[in-house]
Image: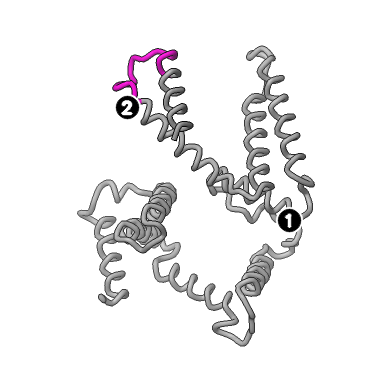
Amino acid sequence: MKEPGRSLLELLDVIESLRGPGGCPWDQEQELSDIGQHLLEEVCEVLDAISDGGGRPTEHVCEELGDVLMNVFMASVIASEDGSFDLSSVATGIRKKLVRRHPHVFGDKAVKNSEEVLKLWNSIKEEERKEKAPSGEDASAASILDRIPRSLPSVRRAEKVSEKASSCGLDWVDATGVIDKLKEEVSELEGALSVDADRVAGGAIQEELGDILFTAVNLCRKLGYSADEALVRSTRKFITRFKCVEMDLGTIEGRNADELNAAWDRVKGSEADE
């Protein structure tokens, strides 16, 4: 197997060449904010590759991880151009963090299982957070919800927020309470829709839609399901049915609503017969 260090240096050389004089105009135009969006997309492609491969380390997973690595290198090179930090700083920082947060491996702490590892990890993170707080500022005064990344996909962020709130005791007793709340939110949406559009102020309809979605996320959590996975499954089911409608009709363009709905019902009916 090729030495990792050499391969990484070769990749860094390629990235610096792309950004340097005589390099690629598109790469030269990229800014850190652009790389953030690229990273999000590439990470999602890694997740798809892992899922497609049944959790196995396939060649496709390797390829997609390479795209993520390239963007990490590109972001580091962009930062190095104005002296902010470089790839070495990134690697050194994460190495020190890993050593610091694994005193049971690199120190004299003892743990019995993974649960104790997580507890230790979180306590160290909390100490780090307090140390980084500006002088004179009470780090404990910050909301625990501030620790949830704002750029998480919206469904996952809603899950994390509701989980944190629940861990503090702010939660429904059972799923029935959430279902009642969901019905209440739907009723409020109906009320907002009944108002003349010109009189709806402050995006009331959008706000009520958001409340319905957030409550639905909580219902999934209360029932022990991932809202993200539930939505993925429903979206996948819709795509499958849509493709079957396309096959049923031969072509979907130019069809009227009655034809489309009839084909949809046929597809659903065929699923029930299986």
Range of the magenta residues? 246-260
Rendering coords of residue 178 (x, y %): 73, 39
Rendering coords of residue 194 (x, y %): 68, 15
Mark nearer the N terminus (2 vs 1): 1
Residue position marked by numbered label 2 in the rendering: 247
Given residues 19 and 156, the one toward you in this image is: 156
Side (left or right) of 97 relative to 146: left
* Residue found at x 62% / y 76%: 113
Q: Amino acid at mark 2?
A: Met
Can you tell which of label 2 and label 1 is closer to the viewer? Answer: 2
Q: In the image, is residue 51 part of the stretch drawn in magenta?
A: no
Side (left or right) of 7 relative to 130: left
In space, the residues marked 2 and 1 are separated at their CA atoms by: 48 Å
Give the colouring mode of the picture: one colour
Rendering coords of residue 111 (x, y %): 64, 80
- Tell me if residue 16 comes above or below residue 244 in the rendering: below
- Tell me if residue 185 comes above or below residue 107 in the rendering: above
User: In the picture, residue 238 is in which quadrant?
Assistant: top left
Q: Residues within 10 Å of mark 2 (few under 14, many from 20)?
A: few
For residue 51, the mark is none
Q: Amino acid at mark 1?
A: Ser
Determine whether the residue tagged by mark 1 lies in a helix, strand or loop: helix
The C terminus: image quadrant: top left
Q: In the image, is residue 250 part of the stretch drawn in magenta?
A: yes
Residue 80 shows in the view: yes
Residue position marked by numbered label 1 in the rendering: 167
